[in-house]
Amino acid sequence: MIDTLTNTVLFVMLVLTALAIVRMERLFAVVMLSSVFSLLSALLFVTLDAVDVAFTEAAVGAGISTVLMLGTIALTKPIAKRSRHTAFVPLIVVCVTGAALVYGTLDMPAFGAYDAPAQMHVGPDYLARTPDDIDVPNVVTAILGSYRGYDTLGETAVVFTAGIGVLLLLSGLRRRREDEDEEV
Amino acid sequence: MIFHHLILRVVTKLLVGTIILFALYVQFHGDFSPGGGFQAGVIMAVAFILYGIVFSLESVKKVFPEWLVHKILALGVLIYAGTGIATMLLGYDFLDYDAFAPLHPTHGQHWGLLAIEFGVGVTVTGVMVAIYYAFAGRPPSLTDEDW
């Protein structure tokens, strides 16, 4: 009962935040609201008992990406450009996609179902074996680090590659601009 | 200019240490409580980014210079992959942490998890701070009044 109430309130606030973001033109407010959006999602993850994910969402979504968005605004303009197109076609596309997604969820197991496929296959096995194999209380760490060590190595490499990519793009531009300045 | 944003400056000085401490807690207590290398890395980076926002990019670069950030960015992946190589050299599979304590496999797992989580944390800290430096290091087109 209280779960349903919490989820409903959080989802309503999430939708209201999204609508406010769409209506806003001042990008500073948009960035702040998207940070609020991330915090609300983090709360939803907490109600789903996915504390590790909530942690990440709060730190990355609400923290660092907000700072990076503000940095981007500082490099560009603080006001959104007014769109000259009508919103009619995008609205139809969004409605059709949304309807398709909702239709897709009809086949999914009920919210919190114990016999959902995600709870049936390797999950119980990991839960049963972790105390003997790894002996750490946080099963998420055991799965990420030990059972799925390759995947986490891959993820670390992805984060590394992303960082290198951003560095190449942004620092390269700066150097070229300095070269041009010297030539002038 | 010294009294510009006085409250923010004082509160930041109080907070940065606490944030770093919390990052270390999340890093090394990840086996027992929510969190791990990724979350710890992000929180650690937040401490430096907060310092950079409130003071200046130059002052945070004195603490955490750009060349060091670029080094640790790669160092983390090396620590992670190196842990795997180490287990191989000890005669076990890649990333099979039982190798670190053959008589007590769970202890070996603890050591292995500690090492790879540290690698993840180091890389994530480096990447987040490097991206922030890359964004903040470019000359802004807006002045403070434009906001």
Image (spheres, rainbow, N blue to C red):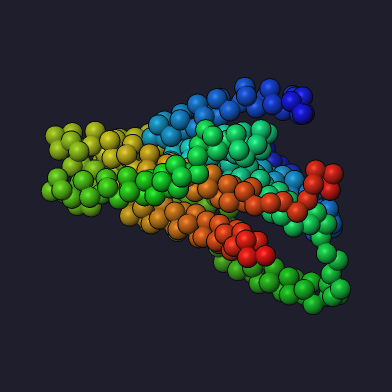
A178 lies left or right of B71: right
Instruction: Residue at 18% x, 42% y: name it.
Output: B99
Looking at the picture, does residue A99 appear above or below residue A4? below
Q: Nearer the viewer, residue B55 or A137?
A: B55
Instruction: Residue at 63% x, 65% y: name it.
Output: A183
Instruction: Residue at 64% x, 68% y: name it.
Output: A101
Q: Nearer the viewer, residue A97 or A70?
A: A70
Looking at the picture, does residue A14 appear above or below residue A46? below
Q: Nearer the viewer, residue A112 or B68?
A: B68
Q: Position of residue A68 (x, y in %)?
A: 64, 49
Q: Position of residue A34 (x, y in %)?
A: 71, 50
B15 lies left or right of A130: right
Q: Nearer the viewer, residue A13 or B18?
A: B18
| Quadrant of the snapshot with the C terminus of chain A | bottom right
Q: Position of residue A2 (x, y in %)?
A: 67, 38
Q: Position of residue B98 (x, y in %)?
A: 20, 42
- Looking at the image, the residue that sits furthest to the bottom is A89
Q: How many marks?
A: 0
Instruction: Residue at 73% x, 75% y: name it.
Output: A93
Looking at the picture, does residue A73 appear above or below residue B115? below
- In this orientation, does residue B1 appear? yes
| Quadrant of the snapshot with the N terminus of chain A | top right
- In this orientation, does residue A8 appear? no
B145 lies left or right of B20: right
